[in-house]
Image (cartoon, grey):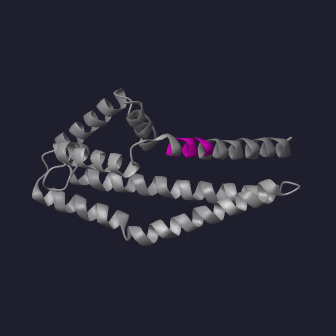
């Protein structure tokens, strides 16, 4: 029974990947305006509307941070981000390796449940680590803020959720609908 669930899960996952790939291909051929110009315009609008001269953007730009707070938050973010280019290449290589392993598993005559479980455990560990790092960063930033600024930030988050912005995936879908 477990094997059947794993097989069905694998088939569903692959069909989702194929669907997304197909939709992406269709969108790429049907878009009339170049994607980069849309992205550049969105970025420029963000700079005009949400980013202050101090470099803070989004809700952080609206918290009236002191110069010391800005420096501390920038240091936290730089520590969090580290060397993005090296990390990006590393993560991309890991994703490609994972996709290759999935391809081998799904095209095999019989499903190797142990290998599927190892891949699932690896993915779960990565997701857990990203979650922990995100919470640690949010906590570190929160410690820099005054109680009033924390309250204001919580209010911004509540308002954002009420508007339907629940994360980057939903945000992208929201932008496409407009």
**Residue that protrudes farthest toward the right in the picture:** 109
Q: Could you say which is closer to the camera, residue 135 or residue 59?
A: 59
**Horizontal and vertical percent position of residue 18:** 66, 45
Query: Is residue 102 shown above or below 157?
Result: below
Farthest-out residue, front: 32
Give the prevailing secondary structure in the magenta stretch. Answer: helix
Locate residue 15: give its quadrant: top right
122 lies left or right of 11: left
Residue placed farthest to the top in the image?
162
Query: The magenta stretch spans which residues?
Result: 22-28
| Left or right: 89 in relation to 41 | right
User: Which x, y percent locates residue 70?
Assistant: 17, 57
Q: Nearer the viewer, residue 4 or 146?
A: 4
Residue plotted at (78% across, 53% down): 106
- Residue 113: horizontal and vertical position, in percent? 81, 55
Picture coordinates of residue 140 (x, y %)?
30, 56
Q: Residue at x 72, y 41 (%)?
A: 12
Residue drawn at x 51%, y 46% is 28
Look at the image and tell me in which quarter the N terminus lies.
Answer: top right
- How many numbered callouts? 0
Asked if the magenta segment contains residue 57, the reply would be no
Residue 53 is left or right of residue 109, and the answer is: left
Rendered-image quadrant of the C terminus: top left
Position of 161 relative to 114 (above/below): above
Q: Name the residue at 60% across, 43% down.
A: 20
Q: Residue 170 sits in which quadrant?
A: top left
């Amino acid at each position: 029974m477990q094997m059947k669930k794993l097989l069905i899960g694998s088939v569903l996952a692959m069909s989702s990947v194929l669907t997304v790939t197909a939709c992406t291909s269709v969108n790429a051929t049907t878009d009339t305006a170049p994607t980069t110009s849309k992205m550049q315009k969105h970025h420029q609008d963000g700079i005009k509307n949400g980013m202050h001269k101090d470099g803070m953007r989004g809700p952080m730009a609206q918290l009236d941070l002191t110069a010391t707070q800005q420096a501390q938050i920038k240091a936290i973010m730089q520590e969090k981000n580290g060397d993005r280019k090296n990390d990006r290449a590393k993560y991309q290589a890991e994703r490609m390796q994972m996709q290759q392993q999935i391809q081998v598993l799904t095209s095999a005559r019989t499903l190797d449940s142990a290998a599927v479980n190892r891949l699932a455990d690896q993915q779960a560990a990565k997701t857990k680590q990203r979650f922990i790092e995100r919470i640690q960063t949010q906590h570190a930033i929160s410690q820099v803020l005054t109680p009033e600024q924390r309250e204001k930030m919580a209010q911004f988050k509540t308002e954002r959720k009420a508007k339907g912005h629940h994360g980057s995936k939903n945000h992208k879908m929201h932008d496409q609908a407009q």
